[in-house]
Image (spheres, grey):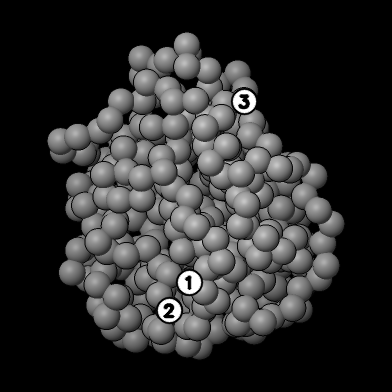
Amino acid sequence: MLTRREFVRSAAVVGAAAVGGNLAGCASPSSHKATGEAAAQPEQTAQPQQAVPPSEEQSSPKSTSPDGAIVYFTPDISPKGLAAIYQAVGRQARGKVGVKISTGEAGGRNYLKPELIGELVQAVNGTILECNTAYGGSRSTTQAHLAVAAEHGFTAIADVDIMDANGEVALPVAGGKHLSEDYVGATFPDYDFVVNLAHFKGHAMGGFGGVVKNASIGMASADGKRWIHSAGTSKDSWSSAAQDDFLESMAEAAKAVADHLGDNVVYLDVMNNLSVDCDCDSNPAKPEMADIGILGSTDPVALDKACMDLVYAAKDGQALIERIESRNGAHTLDYAEQIGLGTQSYRLVEV
């Protein structure tokens, strides 16, 4: 198996020029001790998919290639690196912009810090988007959630909209077998463009969380979170849905959000503080692997798949791999591809 360094080297550097100047335009009730159904190994291993030869320099950013979606990568986890990936993806935010993050549970420490994301949020004139949790904790009410957002420094960099503070709206789910509608925060349709800015890490129930989870459970109202976790059987309580049904419901909800936004969304994954636990955990496990980098794409499935491959390629990724496999996490992306949310075929381009 490739080491992280060997994998990154294999993704040859393309002429995605350095970016400078101004930029244009979890819900889990369980701790990291939660158990999950044993899962088969993912069908695809961590071998990199079609790294870009140095001779194939691009004159302008593109979102797809003959080999699948393009996923941009930088090992530079900094405001400059985040700006470079956003610019490389080539889809500029416009209109009223929301930036969907996780504000992180009180007591947590691995969430994306304002010092990292603040410049990008302000450059796109973005409002930070969140919804209340469905499992109690410190963010289950709007007042408490805003207090945590302030404590974690997010209200200092932008306005924060708890989208389900005054209810929810239903988005249609096309082609789903579990959900016919996805319940998101009431103010979500007010936004013209969304920057889906996710912290890639483990998750006690889903195995991992990235942009697909950030679009599904992350955008869902508190009732919508219960709806997804129960695979469309209850908005009032946590229901014991079969594991794969829950994973498939996450993908269906993410597709409803993606269908609503069309081309008015960009997807970014930050691979730092790679705990096996979600930022919704108030006492997450300490990361057991080194930070990797920042990735971006117009395809959420390709992006999360590239992140997963980087975890598998890392020499120190065993704990997170075990978390993913014990929850059958790869099935989320298999099913997401099946229903047309995106492709798992990608080409990695280093910025």
Where residue 5 appears, x then y in whole percent? 53, 41
Residue 225 vertical placement versus 83 (above, below): below
Residue 25 vertical placement versus 221 (above, below): above
Where residue 100 appears, x then y in whole percent? 39, 58
User: Which residue type carries mark 3?
Assistant: Gln
The numbered mark at residue 50 is 3
Residue corresponding to mark 2:
108
**Gap in angstroms between the C-alphas marked 3 and 2:** 37 Å
Foreground mark, 1 or 3, reads 3
User: Which residue type carries mark 2?
Assistant: Gly
Dot 3: within a 10 Å radius of its alpha carbon, few (fewer than 14), some, or many (20 or more) residues? some
**Residue for point 71% across, 53% down:** 330
Is residue 95 visible in this depiction of the protein? yes
Mark 2–mark 1 contact, CB under 8 Å? Answer: yes
> Could you tell me which quadrant the C terminus lies in?
top left
In the image, 18: left or right of 184? left
Residue 247 falls in which quadrant of the image?
bottom right
In the image, 221: left or right of 162? right
Residue 312 vertical placement versus 35 (above, below): above
Dot 1: within a 10 Å radius of its alpha carbon, few (fewer than 14), some, or many (20 or more) residues? many
The numbered mark at residue 241 is none
Residue corresponding to mark 1:
279
Where residue 309 appears, x then y in whole percent? 63, 45
